[in-house]
Amino acid sequence: MMDFTIDTVRAGVANGSATATAMAELHYSRIAADDGDKGKGINSFLALSKERALAQAAKIDALAAKGEELPALAGVPVGIKDVLTMKGSPATAGSLILKGYRPPYDATAVTKLETAGAVLLGKLNCDEFAMGSSNENSAYGPVLNPRALDRVPGGSSGGSAAAVAAGFAVATLGTDTGGSIRQPAAFCGVVGVLPTYGRVSRYGLIAFASSLDRVGPFTNNVKDAATVLQVLAGQDAMDATSSDRPVGDYVGALEKPVEGLRIGVPAEYFGEGLDPEIRAAIEKVLDGLKAEKCVIKPVSLPHTKYAIPTYYVIATAEASSNLSRFDGVRFGLRSAEAKTLSEMYRKTRDEGFGPEVKRRILLGTYALSAGYYDAYYKKAQQVRALLTRDFLTAFNEVDVIVGPMTPTPAFKLGEKTDDPVAMYLADIYSVAASLAGICGVSVPCGQTKDGLPIGVQIMGKHFDEGTMLRVGLAVEKMQG
């Protein structure tokens, strides 16, 4: 099966060897053949938006027929994680509590993609309210990993990563709160970008943890990721946390050599628990960068060991606040059994939320409660400041930091569902960058002897996605 790139799709539409309509139909046929939720289907799509997609494709074909200049993503089939709103399409966030909800507006990221010519195929499966590391928490069934159907695709953006890996879309949007783009990208063998906090608008994103949530792309290669990020990036009047910093030329930056760049290697990311095959793959990447005349320097991120507990205090506290709006009053599910207002709140939330969401709401409410706020939430924010300082100190000495993306390859479906702590520890290498607000990318860098993908994590300074992606392209080229 041919894997398309943004360049091949756009060029084909421009020169008349393909049409945006035919490209959309081809991808819909792939979805119909291999993405059902029965049997061996991947289960990556929750809803298709065929009418909207084919209308957009017709517009692009009309532009091409006139010989007009085509936008950056002309005719490119794209999927959207179901925590981002698309007018008229379901927005469930993988939860029963939002079943049937169809938002009346588009997320800014969705608008930007469509303005750039993308053809939006539909909404992608995800862990409920983006809470999970395996995409087994969706109310609509787990997503399977296209590289190994008995394995998880990672989470929470497992549907987004799987759709690209399976060839159902050329690019997809995901969200990353504590690793939810980068970790599934590593598990599925695709590229996944975590932009700097504030680089991409969160308007239209169903919130999990507002100081951590970020929107970013999945693609099959680094250049495509740079192209989509270029489209998404920039200030948005609808999002007060979006930055007014100028957007760099991410695609142009890829042409610069990596020679002379200083590559930081954090000792804390190579300790106990790291799979030997992943360690060997990352060391091979570092040797390759050294051969490209990069300078390899050890760095220390001493507060890394506190990242997981810090993250799970802050993220659950913010989730407790954000998810209080789902009460059966305004939108989504309303329990038919309730006879009083308090019963409606209680029964709606009991019926609508899954076990992982309930767990995190309880943890977050406890952390914010009177008498415990200072001990938990305030302390976690203080440690977050220390983690951020670790990165700022390291970036005084190096241009990017390189290390493993995950401690193990993709684990088996059901392997960790009964042990939440073991599941949380799967994010050990991803949450620190999330807490610090820096950018990161996962790039495929090999596979295990069993054929499971391995991803390398490249972390960049705040708003220095260009340098990070340059190094990512160098790693990609090493793979041949």
Image: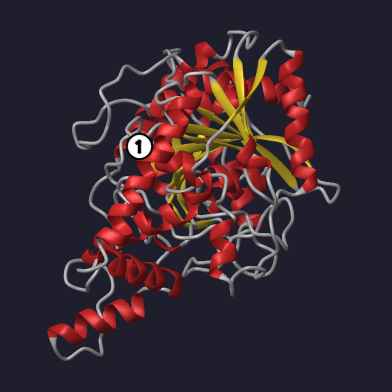
Query: Residue, x 60% and y 16% (percent of image)?
Result: 262
Instruction: Tell me where residue 291 sits by quadrant.
Output: top right
- Amino acid type at mark 1: Ala
Q: Is residue 162 left or right of residue 84?
A: right
Q: In the rendered view, would you say 266 is above or below 348?
A: above
Residue 319 seen: no
**416 or 225: nearer the eye?**
416
The image shows residue 127 at horizontal and vertical percentages of 48, 60
Query: Residue, x 20% and y 36% (percent of image)?
Result: 240
Q: In the rendered view, would you say 228 is above or below 414?
A: above
The residue indicated by pointer 1 is 109
Q: In the rendered view, would you say 117 is above or below 100?
A: above
Residue 442 seen: yes
The image shows residue 417 at horizontal and vertical percentages of 59, 71
**54 or 105: nearer the eye?**
105
Give the SS element for disc 1: helix
